[in-house]
Amino acid sequence: MIRVVVVEDEVLVKKGLILTTDWQKYGCEVVGEASNGIEGVREIERIRPDIVITDVRMPGLDGIGMIEQVKAAGLKPEFVIISGYSEFDYARKAVKLGVRDFLVKPIDDEDLDAALKSTCEAVHDKQRINKIQDKMNDVSDSRVMLFKEYLLDEKKDNDYVALAVKHINSNYQKDISVKSVADSLFISESYLSRLFKNQVGQTFGDYLAYYRIKKACELLKKPNGKIYEVANLIGYKDQRYFSMIFKKLVGVTPKEFREGLD
């Protein structure tokens, strides 16, 4: 549920808003209330709601001052301002503070409905982005980011494993396999598989997948290009299969990875 705090010095207006609004319709619940900006700051810092609906003119600390203090404390709820005063100056200050909507008393039901719908949508977008960011924080520890490429400069030119890795480096965009590489080296598939696993610590297929997905991460950092194009560029013709391998190794989907970079 989306958590809401209502800050309003007029008791009837506050109780009317809390008790007559169908909060469940919007997936909301009122979790706190306050009668002025000073109480509002305390409640918001204590509860950390998703939405704050506040009057502008209140004793002690007005709505604009309260919003400024809340933002200065690093909290970022969505704000909807209600007021009996439709002065442009308040609206301008509210816009600068990133207030989601500005409603004038007496509040029209349709205006309130529209304000709550748009504000709840903004909260859902924020929650989705936060979820992606949380996942992105774990990406640095993902298996693909910890993948270390096989060091070729320490190997001899006639080393079959080194030659296989060079083949991956040069042909990962193509349809390659341990069999096709073994054939190009004139050795058996089983022999190359055994050498590769013993020397690299991974199977040929796993190494190829890690290498491709790491290349995909580099390509996804560029704003242009579709996900299916990225898949094709690293050797996957099936975008769904590419997405499945990407999520398995990175922990997020290619789309989530790109959105998390914004």
Image (cartoon, helix red, strand yellow):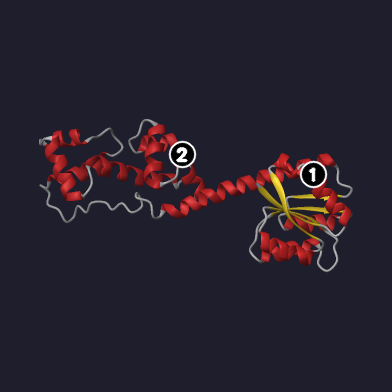
Relative to 147, 61 lies left or right: right
Q: Quadrant of residue 67?
A: bottom right
Q: Nearer the viewer, residue 129 or 155?
A: 129
The mark total stands at: 2
Q: Give the image location of residue 43, x and y in percent.
A: 72, 62
Relative to 90, 182 lies left or right: left
Query: Could one spot residue 86 in this view of the protein?
Result: no
Q: Give the image location of residue 107, x and y in percent.
A: 86, 46
Q: In the image, what residue type sits under mark 1?
A: Thr
Q: In the image, what residue type sits under mark 2?
A: Gly
When the figure is inspected, residue 77 is found, relative to residue 118, above or below; the finding is below
Query: Could one spot residue 30 in this view of the protein?
Result: yes
When the figure is inspected, residue 157 is found, relative to residue 72, above or below; the finding is above
Local packing at callout 1 (Cα closer than 10 Å; few below 14, some 14-19, many 20+) is some
* Mark with earlier residue (2, 1): 1
Q: Nearer the viewer, residue 86 or 8?
A: 8
Q: Give the image location of residue 200, x and y in percent.
A: 20, 49
Relative to 146, 108 lies left or right: right
Give the residue at mark 1: 21
Q: Give the image location of residue 249, x and y in percent.
A: 36, 45
Residue drawn at (78%, 61%), measured in percent from left and top? 64
Disc 1 secondary structure class: loop
Q: Nearer the viewer, residue 124 or 217?
A: 124
Local packing at callout 2 (Cα closer than 10 Å; few below 14, some 14-19, many 20+) is few
Residue drawn at (83%, 41%), measured in percent from left and top? 109
Give the residue at mark 2: 225
Disc 2 secondary structure class: loop
